[in-house]
Amino acid sequence: MHLAVSARTDTGRLRKGNEDNLYADANEYRGLFIVADGMGGHAAGEVASQMAVDLISSELSDLNDLTASDAQQRVSDTLRLANRRVFQRTATEIDKTGMGSTASALLLSDTHYLIGHVGDSRIYLVRDGVMQQLTRDHSLVQEQVDAGLITQEQARHHPQSNVITCCIGMSSDIEPAIIVGETRVGDVFLLASDGLTGMVEDRRLQQLLQSRAAPERIVNAMIADANNNGGIDNITAIVVKVITADTQFPTGEVTPVPQPR
């Protein structure tokens, strides 16, 4: 398996700190990529997202066979463990009360992908010219869309678009979404916090993901677009291209998998 990867997080234009965290790592069997968007005052959001990323990456570091009989359960159990750890800390530290984090984790091999997801950070797949949102937002407006009360476009500009219904640390237990599928050469994956997806329209994201540019160029363009459109939140993006060994990009060499933040 050959992956071209770029990962970056940006504070944005209005926030003083960055409560997003990310992780990107690969070995000869699989890649592991995580985006977490924290929430809570007194820098508690940054603590929650870092706790989530650290625990998930540690617990899943040796999960190399994505088709193993226990693989999906391991991912679900790991997100639930992260939830319990964060929730317990909110109960014991007054200044951490109410903190939480989204968590979207992608494990990727040359034949399959496996996703664990909680919150409203997103994972997209572009394949054969079509972009699909693989994850479903755990949010109030998504529930209203599902019920037919508002359209997807109305949800985008809804005043409660940032209200999430499930996240790491919100309650004593959660039920993560687990998504599986097959991987093909040519696939392009995007993991993003809502600081990106809330500021850049899907058609623009698809245009960038379909380009022949190296992932680093794509990530930089996405973050620039989000900032140019207001940059009201922290912005995080990980772009992963599944490629052949001899792939070259017009904009430069294959981007190596970055060191975890």
Image (cartoon, rainbow, N blue to C red):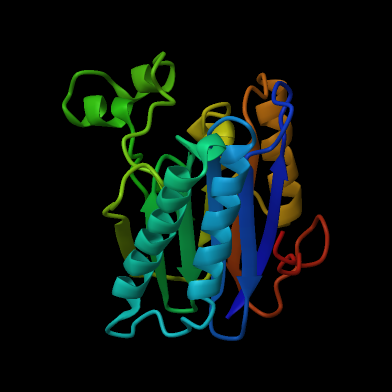
The residue sitting at 30% across, 31% down in the picture is 142
Residue 66 visible from this viewpoint? yes
Q: Position of residue 213 (x, y in %)?
A: 72, 53
Residue extending farthest to the left is 147
The residue sitting at 43% across, 78% down in the picture is 111
Q: Position of residue 44 (x, y in %)?
A: 58, 39
Circle count: 0
Q: Position of residue 259 (x, y in %)?
A: 74, 67
Say which of 179 and 54 sits in front: 54
Residue extending farthest to the right is 252
The residue sitting at 57% across, 39% down in the picture is 45
Left or right of 177, for residue 109: right
Q: Position of residue 6 (x, y in %)?
A: 70, 57
- The correct choice, above or below, for 217 with respect to 60 in the image is above
- Image quarter (top left, top right, bottom left or bottom right) of the C terminus: bottom right
- The correct choice, above or below, for 251 with respect to 137 in the image is below
The residue sitting at 67% across, 80% down in the picture is 245
Figure quadrant of residue 18: top right
- The correct choice, above or below, for 256 with respect to 217 in the image is below
Left or right of 173, for residue 258: right
- The correct choice, above or below, for 151 with respect to 59 in the image is above
Left or right of 209, for residue 181: left
Figure quadrant of residue 236: top right
